[in-house]
Amino acid sequence: MLSWLPQNVSTYGGDIDSLIAFIYYIVGVWFIGTQVFLVYCLIRYRRRAGQRSEYTPGTSLSQMMWILIPCALVLFLDLWIDVRGADVWAKVKIDRPAPHMVVRLTAKQFNWIFTYPGPDDRFGTEDDKKFDNDLHVPVNKVIRIILTGEDVIHSFFVPEMRLKQDVVPGREIPAWFEATRAGRYEIL
């Protein structure tokens, strides 16, 4: 059903895809139910000859229920999405596995600079290797990226990895992924 998503090549991408599908179905059912109710109201309360419309202020409890029940349903569905999404959020943002490789990403206008530590495994030394706009990582290894920005807010996005993170100047923001399939994937 969600064939419009790009192929998933990360370990946590399936969890994100299932959460997207969950939200998609909840919103779809709610939308269809709302449209059916709207058509019902259009037919049921249409203009009829000899019948005047009446003003209903909505002060009685039975009238307020037309607002309170949908609000309660939306609140319940939102909390259900939050509970399902909390596990995925924890897996991606909080419970990060130990990295096999660390890469430093510096974003600047129209450019991504990827820095790999040299043989000494430390950043900021002369043996660091830098590449413009190309990230090369091994398959089935946890990659940690430290994102920094030089000028403005950037958005690092690799759809196939289900990785999207804003890069803010003056901050170091950690992110991680584990590619499960070799290939060339565009950084948007």
Image (tube, rainbow, N blue to C red):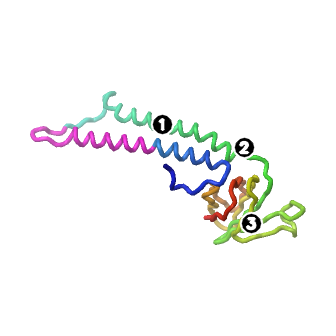
Q: CA distance from mark 3 to mark 1?
A: 43 Å
Residue 183 placement (x, y as % from top left): 67, 62
Compare residues 52 and 29 and report the one nearer the observer: 29
Q: Residue furthest top?
A: 61
Q: Main secondary structure of the magenta part?
A: helix
Q: Which residue is painted at 35% across and 31% down in the image?
A: 65
Residue 74 placement (x, y as % from top left): 45, 38
Q: Is residue 91 left or right of residue 98?
A: left
Residue 114: which disc? Answer: 3
Q: Amino acid at mark 2?
A: Asp
Q: Which residue is painted at 64% across and 44% down in the image?
A: 89
Identify the residue under disc 1.
75
Q: Amino acid at mark 3?
A: Phe
Q: Is residue 17 left or right of residue 135?
A: left
Q: CA distance from mark 1 to mark 2?
A: 28 Å
Residue 95: which disc? Answer: 2
Secondary structure beneath dot 1 equals: helix
Extent of the magenta region? 27-53
Q: Quadrant of residue 119?
A: bottom right
